Image (tube, helix red, strand yellow):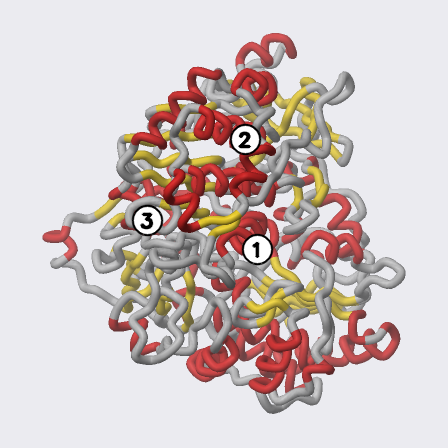
Amino acid sequence: MKRPESTIEPMPLSLSLPAPVMSQVHLGAATHCPYCALQCGMYVTPAHEGGPVVTPRHDIPANAGALCQKGWTAGELLTNGARLTSPLARADRASPLEPVSWEEALARVAGAVRAVQAAHGPDGVAVFGGGGLTNEKAYLLGKFARVALATSQIDYNGRFCMSSAAAASTRAFGMDRGLPFPVTDIAEADVVLLAGCNVAETMPPFMRHLPAGLIVADPRETRTAARARLHLRVTPGTDLALALGLLHIAITEGYADPAYIEARTTGFQEVRASVASWWPERAERVTGVPVAQMREAVRLLGTAGRAMIITGRGAEQHAKGTDTVTAFINLALALGLPGRAGSGYGCLTGQGNGQGGREHGQKADQLPGNRRIDDPAARAHVAAVWGVDPRDLPGPGRSAYELLDALGTDGGPRALLVFGSNPVVSAPRTGRVAERLAALDLLVVSDIVLSETAAMADIVLPTTQWAEEHGTMTNLEGRVLLRRQAVAPPSGVRSDLAIISALAALLGRGEGFPGEAREVFDELRRASAGGVADYSGITYERVAAGAMYWPVPAEDHPGTPRPFLDRFATPDGRARFLPVDHRPPAEDVDEEYPYYLTTGRVLAQYQSGAQTRRVAALNDAAPEPFVEVHPDLAERLRVAQGDLVRVTSRRGHAEVAARLSRAIRADTVFMPFHWEGANRLTNPALDPVSRMPEFKVCAVRLERAGGPPGAPPGEPRVAPAPGARAGRGREA
């Protein structure tokens, strides 16, 4: 049945209570939102009837009294009927998941881990973490993998988030901090270029910080682009060429800042030579962005008193994402922006603790404090804190997708422990991921609900969530925030820290794995001391009392909200220009697959949807997947609003309803990734530096399709993931 035509959900971006109303509300525990990296401040008050009451805080500048719909409805996460409250396990592979005691569940995990490692060695067991875990959980999980399991096979879903920007920032500035300035500085800029960021839907309260002089580079006219002064509608996969063309204009038309370049950077002449061939007309042919718009963008940035360039997933989730971000950093450096008050380069991370989650040990190549795992000095420091021999610490393992792709193969891990992630929906080429999970000897998932990944597990461990526990998070501006427990967890669940502690004890590591957050944080402080991300001077008391921006190397240090004002974090204190060049997408369009697919988020849903799809108000607002198609393309395909469309790539297909919109390019279609389907199509081609998959562009074909017989209204109408074994599908 066809649906009424609709292009944008009729929902406000963010809502706030005025301060006089706030004063009449009983304020509960001061904590932070469970969703994005803005980490909006909120109060959570237990209610006698219904769920906990959520109200916004005015003392956190990132949101200053505003919350989006996801924040306002976050209390329902704590009480909805999908919540897991008992461990689950299968009697055998063909059996369904059934409730078991904690003692039995943990004993079975430990016994199976020992058996797998006896047969396949330490790397036979792998760990996959999440960017929503607190700093304490991320730290203890990394330590658990490397000490209790002695495995090198650990990575996390944050590899799919801002790893390209992290790599580019590290090699340019010597430091990976998403925004090297407070988010409130953005409002002081006259002009901001957002490259691949749709903050109006991903973090709506952020919109209040953006100036009138907003430039957006995006293939779609998103809610954010619709509010921009200038929208650069770039062809998917050509953001790097756009940045090169903008830099060429900046240099040749006199907008570069020679005094800044001379005083604060190195490598400019090499970059100048490398962009000499990227004249505007060439950039227009590649990107589709008119020369006049490119010149206007550079003029706005180059003549502004204060300007910022900020990248997001749209520019980064490519097999050349690190080089793309480097090109935008080169543009910012040529204009003299980084390290100036009210100006600079930054990156918007997505997940709640995407910043802190990688700083303290979840990434395959990093140790706490954002230290390189292959650095002998870093290994010695962390090993001393952990009380182990540095030679016993494993080296770097596989990155996230490479780890998932190797599961169950010869030489690959035979067991996987997942904490706070849902790769069956969120990884690229999810059909392949489902096959690899099904091939494991053991799959253990710790989560709050029975996600698509948990439904495939042999053992599921129910865990506490955001308002039921203490811990710290580090938001997109490098500010460490304190989550406070607001409500008691349901009977039968345990915190991830308690789970890790119990498993370590069962594996013979009874010491060094505390289950209490403050004790873990105190050890994290020591392990991070002297690192780039130095938390050694941060305490719970200091975080509760006010803003703490890392690095904080001592308890009398005030923190570092703007680390680049005097020097960059490189050995010589100068930022580095690095020459890069454009290359096509890893998979370009052709006669067989003639359209670009790009993916992203919608306002009412978050990440893989494991949380938001279980909140009634959010699911009512965005109940099912869709494919956004330009009306001209729809006419060629003879597709009407609401018709089922089969979208096919070289990796799989999905059948979803068509949503006609002039917001999308006629050569491109868009699918949100909150449901199974979109990432069955995406390309796992990896960036050679960051190992980021190419989520944002792949080649597809489209055709009208029919829905599966008897599909109930409102259910995601996508073909089932291939490779699921008997007993490992979704539970009834």
Q: How far apart are the two marked residues, 2 and 1, measured between alpha carbons?
A: 27 Å
Label 1, residues with CA under 10 Å away: few <14, some 14-19, many ≥20: many
> Label 1 belongs to which residue?
158
Pointer 2 and pointer 3: residues touching (CB < 8 Å)?
no
Query: Amino acid type of disc 3?
Result: Arg
Q: Which mark is residue 475?
A: none
Asked which secondary structure carries label 3, the reply is loop
Q: In the shown orientation, is residue 9 left or right of residue 704?
A: left
The one of 258 and 98 positioned closer to us in this rendering: 258
The one of 418 and 583 positioned closer to us in this rendering: 583
Label 2, residues with CA under 10 Å away: few <14, some 14-19, many ≥20: many
Q: Quadrant of the N terminus?
A: top right
The one of 388 and 5 positioned closer to us in this rendering: 388
The residue positioned 76% from the left and 80% from the top of the image is 111
Q: Earlier in the sequence, mark 2 or mark 3?
A: 2
Q: In the shown orientation, is residue 624 left or right of residue 25?
A: right
Q: Where residue 440 sits in the image (x, y, percent)? A: 80, 62
> Label 3 belongs to which residue?
340
> Label 2 belongs to which residue?
244
The one of 675 and 565 positioned closer to us in this rendering: 565
Q: Earlier in the sequence, mark 3 or mark 1?
A: 1
